[in-house]
Amino acid sequence: MAAPFIVINTYAIKEGKLEGFRQFVPELFKILEAIEPRVLAINAYVNEDGTEATIVQVHPDAASLEHHHQVAHEHTERAHQFLDATTSIQVYGKPSDVILKRARQLAGSGVAVSVKPEHLGGFTRLAAAAG
């Protein structure tokens, strides 16, 4: 299996919006699971004090993330009622020019962006975890 393409985005949660975000996430992921069959995994986490949320996406390749940006936009935009600006982006795997351009735009606005294109090895057991 080729190395997965992983993106980790972190956002500040708007004050008083954590509970609404907690309710929104399962609804959003149910929609994304239905419209994005190539996504291997997508998970949301929140820090202990409820001020920061992180979304971890695992794709088979960069093209899958590009597709995600195209088809999920109308659904993910609704998250902005709960989330403030992106605070960091981590990319693991070789990003496409489109993904790099988007990351550079965000970096220009002060968002921390880290890209690690070289995969040294590993394994993925997503199929076993689903069973």
Image (cartoon, helix red, strand yellow):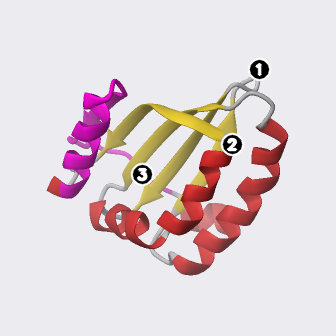
Q: Secondary structure at mark 3?
A: loop
Quarter residue 127 falls in: bottom right
Relative height, residue 101 to residue 39 (above, below)? above
Residue picked out by circle 1: 49
Q: Could you tell whether 74 is left or right of 59 in the image?
A: right
Count of labels in the image: 3
Q: Amino acid at mark 3?
A: Phe
Quarter the C terminus occupies: bottom right
- Residue 49 part of the magenta segment: no
Spatial separation of the CA atoms under disc 1 and disc 2:
15 Å
Mark positioned earlier in the residue sequence (1 or 2): 1
Please state the horizontal and vertical placement of residue 20, each as a whole percent of the image.
81, 46
Spatial separation of the CA atoms under disc 3 and disc 1:
33 Å
Please state the horizontal and vertical placement of residue 23, each as a whole percent of the image.
82, 53
Which residue appears at 43% of the width and 66% of the height?
Answer: 68
Please state the horizontal and vertical placement of residue 99, each as a whole percent of the image.
25, 52
Residue picked out by circle 3: 123
Q: Which residues are magenta?
A: 98-124
Q: Amino acid at mark 1?
A: Asp
Q: Is residue 120 visible?
A: no
Q: Is residue 11 visible?
A: yes
Residue picked out by circle 2: 82
